[in-house]
Amino acid sequence: MSLDVNDITQKMLDAAKGVVSDKWPATRQYFESEAQAFAQRFASIEALRAAGKITEERAKSHVEFQKESWATVLLAVEGLTELTVEQALNAALSAVKDIVNKAIGFALL
Amino acid sequence: MSSFRKAVPALVAFALFALAGCTVKLVADYDEQIDKGVTELQKDTEAFLVKLESNAGTPAAEYKANRKFYDDAKVAISSLRVRADAIQRNSLTVRMLDHLQNNMDRLAHDHAEGIGKEEIALYRGGFNSQFTAILTFELAKKRGQQPSDSDAAAPATPNAAKGGTK
């Protein structure tokens, strides 16, 4: 039995697309929700400074604080994206495992 | 583009053989101790900020009366970092903990200079984003447990949407 590479390719792509379409929207919503919260915080810093409640130096310190926090969020988004890639890859391999193993005659995948 | 399309099946065939017998793993597994440690630190930090707010303007809110919190937090983050660093493919969590320590140091610095009650919401919001980020990623490492649409859309704290103090 010979392998139909085009058929295998399509099955792998379909499996991977299924994972990405399932996982990515939640990650995107998390990112967007956090981005909105940070924008509001930067507005709060500006309002405190404009009202004279904090010094210019303290306002800069608050901005640096929020930048550290934002960097943490971006690392989480990067991690969630890597997990999605990992699951998409494994789903693609799993989708063609039986076909490939049967054609080859032993458990290759 | 058409040459790329022609190459895809060959790439797939190559990938199949290269990955033979493998389950791909790009990031570390879930670690319960990091989950519990970060959750505990979040509670301690929130309790500390609530205490600062309620005692604002009194000696109990001054930096010198609260050094123990910063010392304890530094030990807690350092312990979590050492554990995270000992786990393979866990560099993202290590870097997230480094950013958390940087902000704890910044809060201590600002506190030593004096902080106003109205500033606390900014610290709380930033810390909550960091704790949420670390825990969201840690829980996702269980695989299949990335945030649901509703969880992702919901603010981490009730007043996040209004005041930007998430």
Image (cartoon, rainbow, N blue to C red):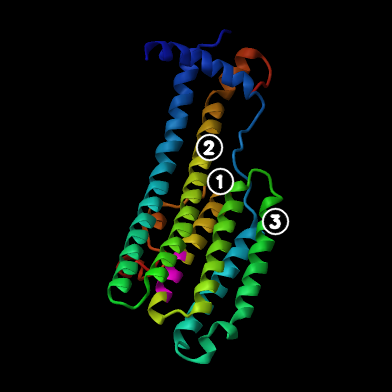
Q: Pinpoint the chain carrying mark 1.
A: B
- Look at 40% across and 51% down and name the residue there: A31
C-alpha separation, residue under disc 2 versus residue under disc 1: 8 Å
The region drawn magenta spans: B120-126
Q: Is residue A77 left or right of residue B92?
A: left
Toward the viewer: B96 or B88?
Answer: B96
Quarter assignment of residue B157: bottom left
Q: CA distance from mark 1 to mark 3?
A: 20 Å
The residue wearing badge 3 is B83
What's the residue at 52%, 68% (across, down)? B106
**Label 2 packing within 10 angstroms: few (<14), some (14-19), many (20+):** many
Quick one: label 3, few (<14), some, or many (20+) residues within 10 Å?
A: some
Helix, strand, or loop for circle 1? loop
Q: Between B149 and B127, which is closer to the camera in this rendering?
A: B127
Query: Which residue is tagged 2?
Result: A87
Q: Secondary structure at mark 3?
A: helix
Image mark for residue B143:
1
Q: Secondary structure at mark 2?
A: helix
Instruction: Say which quarter of the image contains residue B120.
Output: bottom left
